[in-house]
Amino acid sequence: MTQRPGGAKMLSRVAERLYWFGRYLERTENIARLLSVYTNLVLDLPKEGFVWESLVSITGFEHAFKKRFANASERNVVKFLLEDPSCSLRHCVRMARENARTSRDLMPNEAWQKINELHLYLSEDMQQRLKRDGRFEFLSRVIDVSLELTGYLNGSMSEHTPYHFIKMGCYLERADMTTRIIDVACLNFLKPDRRGTTEYDNILWMGVLKSLNAYQMYRQHVQERVNGEDVADYLLKDRYFPRSVAHCLKQVAGSFSQLQHKGKPHRRVSQTQRRISKADLEFLLKENELHDFIDLVQLDLARIHADLSSTWLR
């Protein structure tokens, strides 16, 4: 059980629902952003032999995808990420709604209305969304409603225990997605046979930034041209950009500090923060070791989740 406002106890199953509501809500926005950016990236790189399978790798659903589809064509990947019953955008919204439904008395009514709006929107026929025509408008609406929902939570929900469990879910999911996007960039954009070929690298790393809605803020703070080292540094270490791993961990640590029995999870976050702050990204990229480093960070994030679960959830 965890502490609630006024000294009452919040059952661990309620905390778990709020935590997963935060994770599924963030995952919904992330998948919509990735699909939108990748669709536009294909148009920018018509001769590059763009691999849609990379998008499946980022989301971590390779095994489920291969069970359904023989090849990673654009149509198959988009269909999978829009409507698969266990991994898709539709699934994430359904799970977010279900977790919110059983805890709706703890969040603003407007948030519940928005998650219902999103659920009904995604219940419509998806066939037209598989084509590029109209896909951008569809995904933009999903992103907009997700942001509105997040805005109601941040602007209208008291910062007591329920709020912190939603926040922890949101920021751990966000940190995980940021590391996945950087990791796939390492594997696909920095292969030995691509060394010295800079014709497309600028566009590809711009795609990484745009996947996280980071391009404009990056350009304000980094004066050099878009390149792998600076992008990785910004998305891992910047403590002020909301989707950087460092910022996400800072937010998670802040929520941990508001809860009882925070010792082990809080120490784990501190260890991960130190790992990231000490990383020499120039060396890691030069030696082709950034992928291995990202693996360690992702393992740290998994352990933070495990520590959080064993401490406060069922």
Image (cartoon, helix red, strand yellow):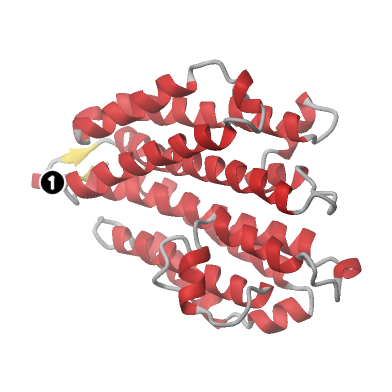
The answer to which quarter of the image holds residue 270 is: bottom left
Which x, y percent locates residue 28?
Answer: 49, 38
Tell me if I can see residue 161 in this picture: yes
Q: Residue at x 44, y 44 (%)?
A: 26
The answer to which quarter of the image holds residue 104 is: top left
Structural crowding at the residue carrying mark 1, measured as other residues with C-alpha within 10 Å and reported as few (<14), some (14–19) or many (≥20): few
Which x, y percent locates residue 42?
Answer: 73, 47
**What secondary structure is found at the residue carrying circle 1?**
helix
Q: Is residue 64 above or below residue 293?
A: above
Along the viewing direction, whichever of 40 and 190 lies nearer the viewer = 40
Count all numbered tags in the image, as a single digit.
1
Which x, y percent locates residue 237?
Answer: 50, 74
Q: Residue at x 38, y 24 (%)?
A: 98
Q: Quadrant of the C terminus?
A: top left
Q: Please give the residue where the numbered disc 1 appears in the rendered image.
A: 5
The answer to which quarter of the image holds residue 89 is: top right
Q: Residue at x 37, y 51 (%)?
A: 168
Q: Is residue 144 above or below residue 76?
A: below
Which x, y percent locates residue 295?
Answer: 67, 62
Tell me if I can see residue 292 in this picture: no
Kind of residue indicated by mark 1:
Pro
Which residue is the extreme one toward the right?
Answer: 193
Q: Is residue 246 above or below residue 95?
A: below
Q: Quadrant of the N terminus?
A: top left
26 with respect to 15 (left or right): right
115 with respect to 226 (left or right): left
Which residue is the extreme one toward the left?
Answer: 6
237 with respect to 111 (left or right): right
Q: Residue at x 62, y 59 (%)?
A: 208
